[in-house]
Image (cartoon, rainbow, N blue to C red):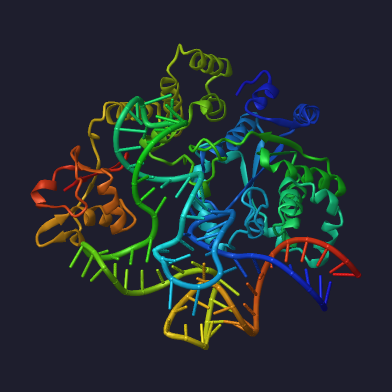
RNA sequence: GGGGGGUUGCCCGAGUGGCCAAUGGGAACAGACUGUAAAUCUGUCGGCGAAUGCCUUCGGAGGUUCGAAUCCUCCACCCCCCA
């Protein structure tokens, strides 16, 4: 790849580079840089939010540098204190391996495997003696650790902070020492941890890493950062229709942000789109359709993007029956005296979490066959009346009964 | 080590012997309206049952009582103040 100005490529979609001078100097040295990114092995999906930093990492690869993925199988036991402020459940080595397998497949939808190294931090953190830990801990002060937003907040709110959580930033920072990182990428919430890495590296006589921070992508709920545990995410392995549909559901204010962080659409074009939405020249819905198409194109194909767009317009805008709904047989549990009990059918197909829930949905008018609502929670129909029809539950769950 | 406060449903938070499956808010889900947006209005929001109803739930284990989220005992965990 021929890039005349590597720095400006690397700057897109970042919030802060600490420091740009250092980065420029390291780039000029001409040697391939080791670019570190920590990976949380407790998740099994690469989300668009995570893809933001992965895409940045890919930019580095295109410039000839090496991606160093650190699987935090050791640190996962501690749990990053940022965010939910809860200690995570411990994972077995097997569970970790399982997630890593799933995730690495997805990661290579973005990264170049030839320029990627993978490490497990258990390999060095797990091997440390207590003495090593004490020595590491001596290189940082309590006051500085407690500066961390989350700790400060929890202290103020009288919520617990366990000793081991205090060690978390040190563990993560030590990873940088171990792999001799030149650059570390991360979401903005990683700022504290990544800066600790810088400081530790100097203590260990290494040149401190450059820290590059990306904004956190807001999830489909429009409020919280996108994360698997919050369920407001789009996975890079979602089907085209899902990916498209989820993208269409984001609030308008996020359009520009998503374009910048999730697509390769040039920034000046993004700015035009946003301006037109604001001025009313463009319907924000159409801007989102473009966005959704771009995203599907990136992880599937441009054709799949068009296809998903068509599906969306037909199914939701024009409220047609979906062309091809997932097929489902009538489970035995849904039958009673030869008739099909609608509530049981909905429940048995997993479209409602309990029988009672299914009845409530029916009562609320959320259940229909071929567009015809079923209003009676106790309705039962002859099998002939349901087979071949499309069952709709809520806004976007469809099953073709066969 | 001493003293005080706390642990309620997805979250926050009321409830201090029966009227409590447990007020209220948020989240979530559904309906209407739409652009599968936002805002708004309405409904639902432990499980099972056609139903009077039954079962499970208020940190854990016991106990008192006709009856306990509420009282007692022990245990676990958390916070604050003092040392």
Q: Is residue A326 above or below residue A222?
A: below
Task: Using residue A361 as the reference point, say whether residue A64 is left or right of it.
Answer: right
Q: Position of residue B76 (x, y in %)?
A: 65, 75
> Considering depth in this image, is A381 or A383 the residue closer to the camera?
A381
- One can see residue A161 in this view: yes
Q: Quick one: quadrant of the N terminus of chain A?
A: top right
Task: Using residue A306 as the reference point, say whether residue A92 is left or right of it.
Answer: right
Q: Is residue A205 above or below residue A299?
A: below
- Name the residue located 23 percent from the left edge and 30 percent from the top edge: A320
Q: Is residue A173 above or below residue A132?
A: above
> Considering depth in this image, is A340 or A401 the residue closer to the camera?
A340
The mark tally for this picture is 0
Q: Position of residue A183 (x, y in %)?
A: 73, 38
Q: Position of residue A398 (x, y in %)?
A: 27, 42
- Name the residue located 67 percent from the left edge and 38 percent from the top edge: A188
Task: Using residue B42 as the reference point, say whether residue B59 is left or right of it.
Answer: right
> Considering depth in this image, is A360 or A204 the residue closer to the camera?
A360
Task: Using residue A71 as the reference point, say whether residue B29 is left or right of it.
Answer: left
Please tell me in which quadrant of the rendered image residue A25 appears.
Answer: top right
Q: Position of residue A70 (x, y in %)?
A: 65, 49
- Name the residue located 49 percent from the left edge and 43 percent from the top edge: A106
- Name the residue located 57 percent from the left edge and 63 percent from the top edge: A93
- One can see residue A263 in this view: no
Q: Is residue B27 above or below residue A344?
A: above
């Amino acid at each position: 790849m021929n890039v005349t100005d590597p720095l400006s490529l690397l700057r897109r979609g970042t919030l802060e580079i600490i420091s740009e001078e250092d980065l420029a100097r390291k780039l000029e040295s001409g040697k391939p840089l080791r670019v570190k990114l920590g990976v949380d092995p407790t998740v099994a999906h690469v989300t668009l939010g995570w893809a933001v930093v992965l895409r940045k990492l890919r930019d580095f690869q295109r410039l000839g540098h090496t991606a160093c993925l650190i699987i935090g199988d050791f640190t996962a036991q501690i749990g990053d204190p940022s965010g939910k402020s809860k200690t995570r459940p411990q994972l077995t080595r097997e569970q970790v391996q399982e997630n890593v397998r799933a995730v690495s497949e997805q990661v290579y939808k973005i990264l170049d495997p030839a320029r990627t190294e993978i490490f497990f931090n258990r390999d060095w953190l797990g091997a440390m003696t207590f003495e090593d830990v004490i020595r590491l801990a001596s290189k940082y002060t309590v006051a500085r650790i407690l500066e961390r937003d989350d700790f400060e907040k929890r202290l103020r709110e009288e919520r617990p902070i366990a000793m081991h959580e205090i060690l978390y930033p040190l563990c993560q920072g030590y990873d940088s020492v171990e792999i001799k990182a030149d650059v570390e990428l991360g979401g903005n919430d990683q700022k504290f941890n990544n800066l600790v890495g810088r400081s530790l590296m100097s203590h260990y006589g290494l040149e401190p890493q450059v820290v590059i921070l990306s904004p956190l992508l807001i999830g489909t709920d429009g409020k919280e950062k996108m994360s698997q545990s919050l369920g407001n995410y789009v996975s890079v392995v979602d089907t085209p229709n899902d990916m498209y549909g989820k993208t269409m559901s984001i609030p308008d204010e996020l359009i520009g942000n998503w374009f910048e962080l999730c697509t390769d659409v040039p920034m000046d074009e993004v700015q035009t789109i946003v301006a037109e939405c604001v001025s009313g020249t463009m319907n924000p819905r159409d801007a989102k359709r473009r966005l959704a198409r771009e995203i599907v194109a990136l992880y599937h194909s441009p054709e799949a993007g068009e296809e998903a767009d068509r599906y969306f317009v037909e199914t939701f805008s024009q409220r047609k029956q979906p062309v091809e709904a997932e097929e489902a047989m009538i489970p035995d549990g849904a039958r009673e005296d030869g008739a099909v009990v609608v509530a049981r059918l909905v429940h048995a197909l997993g479209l409602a979490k309990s029988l009672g829930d299914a009845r409530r949905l029916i009562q609320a008018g959320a259940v229909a066959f071929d567009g015809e609502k079923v209003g009676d929670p106790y309705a039962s129909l002859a099998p002939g009346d349901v087979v071949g029809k499309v069952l709709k539950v809520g806004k976007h769950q469809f099953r073709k009964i066969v």
